[in-house]
Every structure is written in structure tokens, then in C-alpha cells.
Image: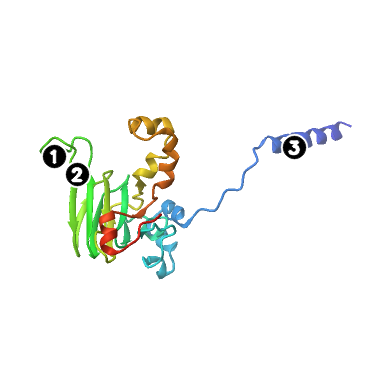
Amino acid sequence: MHFTSTIALAVLASTSSVLAKPLRRSEPALSLTQQLFIADTAVDRFALLPDDKQFIFDFNQPQANPGAGGEIVAANRKTFPALVSTGAGMAVGRINPCGMNTLHVHPRSAELQIVVQGKLVTEMVPENGVNDADGKRRVIRTEVGPFQMTPFYQGSVHTQFNPDCEPAVFIAAFPSEDFGTGQIADETFALSDDVIAATFGQSIAGADIDKVRNAIPRNVALGVEECLKKCGIPKNK
């Protein structure tokens, strides 16, 4: 009887111990980029990239969600894992006639932009306190032609516009594998109605806020009416 009780107690103790352990949830497999990040050495990282084709990024691929005025294809450490440990990223933009890369920022990187085809008109606002000779906020405006370059500083608000009737192409280099992009208008109008109304001083009626939100282009958009007329491009209705 004593032997039987001992066995029963042992079984109960074992069962309680098993039940006391938290159930482990199945975790998703690590992406290649994550594996490269936690590799012990550079040698181990190269072992995770056994195919030489993994060191090529094709900018000829289409953008997933292009705007009406062009497209931008970005190489970052997610889209191009071989960039892990390089500290660099790149993008190629194709801006259609009268197209505009709408106001945006790169939160984690500066940008060096080279035009390789056509012409772009760029505007940039660096930060608070950068003023012109009249004490007004300075807007740095450039016209950049083929194989000319202009910088956009980290966190600066900037935009590019193609004023001609031929497509423009640019290459953008970033000293970051994860430079990121935030479209200013899209982010602004994602805020609550009260914040938007306060920011714009009631210049946008509350009843019209949703109309404005829905009208904001997410990325590259068709722009300036004068260019549209010059190039014979009908306005979107």
C-alpha cells in the first residue's frame, strides 16, 4: 500500500509540474534579414547568402503601389537583405511628365539625389530656425539636370517635381539600410479631427476633413496645372 501511494504521489507531482509550465506558442520563422542581423560574424552572414544572385537588386521591378505620376523602387535591408551591415540604401525614382513626389521626410537618413534623365525642380525646408534674409522660413529650391546632384538632410521636408513633358529619372543614395519615408500630408491628415482643425486654424471646415483626407495622394502624384496644360495632360476628375 505504501508503494502504491508513493507511485501515485510521484505521478501527481509530475503532472502538476507539466501543467505549471506555460504553453510555448509557435513562433514565426526568422526572415533572412533577421538571420543576417544575429549572425555571429561576417563570415556567418555570407554563409546565409549562398547564391551570388542574392547580391543583385533589380530596380526594373515595378513599385508595389505606384502613384499616378510615377514610381519609386527602394532597396533597403528588407527588400534587399544583402544590405545588412553595409549601412547604405538606395532608390530609383521615375517621375512622369508633370509628376510630383509629394512632400515627405526620411526619418533615419539624409539623401543624395542624382538626376540621370530629364530635369527635376526640388524644394526643401530644413528645420525651425533656418530663415531667409527677410526672416521668413527658408525654402531651398533647386533645378537639377542630368548628372547633377542635390542633398536632402535627415528629417527635412522635401519634394521633387518634373516640370517637363518627358519622364525624369533619379537615383537616391542613403547612408542607412532603413532610411524610411513619411508622406507629410498623409501623416498629417491621419491625426484626429480636432488636431487637424487646430493645426489649420479652422481653415478646413470639420465637415470637409474627410474629403481632404480622401483627396491626398499617397506618393507620386500629378501636379502643377501649368505643366499639365503645356504637356496636354488632362486633369483627373
Q: Secondary structure at mark 2?
A: loop
Q: Residue under label 2, please give it.
A: 139
State the CA–CA distance, disc 3 to disc 2: 71 Å
Quadrant into which the C terminus falls: bottom left
Cβ–Cβ under 8 Å for marks 2 and 1: yes
Q: Is 85 or 71 nearer to us in this picture? A: 71
Q: Nearer the viewer, mark 3 or mark 1?
A: 1
In-image side of 22 versus 196 (left or right): right
Per the image, the residue denoted by label 3 is 15
Q: Earlier in the sequence, mark 3 or mark 1?
A: 3
Helix, strand or loop at mark 1: loop
**Element class at badge 3:** helix
The first of marks 2 and 1 along the sequence is: 1
The coloring applied to the image is rainbow
Q: Amino acid at mark 1?
A: Asp
Return the residue nearer the eye: 210 or 100.
210
Mark 3 to mark 1: distance in Å? 76 Å
- Could you tell me residue 158's position as x and y percent? 26, 48
Q: Nearer the viewer, mark 3 or mark 2?
A: 2
The numbered mark at residue 6 is: none
Residue at the extreme right of the image, as rendered: 1
Instruction: Tell me the residue that label 1 is attached to.
Output: 132
Task: Give coordinates of residue 205: x percent, y percent.
Answer: 39, 34
Q: Are marks 3 and 1 in contact (CB under 8 Å)?
A: no
The picture places residue 223, in percent across and down from the top left corner, at 31, 54
Residue 167 visible within the image? yes
Answer few, some or many: residues within 10 Å of disc 2's Cα (few below 14, many 20 plus, some between 14 and 19).
some
Image quadrant where residue 47 sits: bottom left
Task: Give the mark nearest the N terminus, 3 or 2.
Answer: 3
Residue 141 image offset from top left, x and y in percent: 18, 50
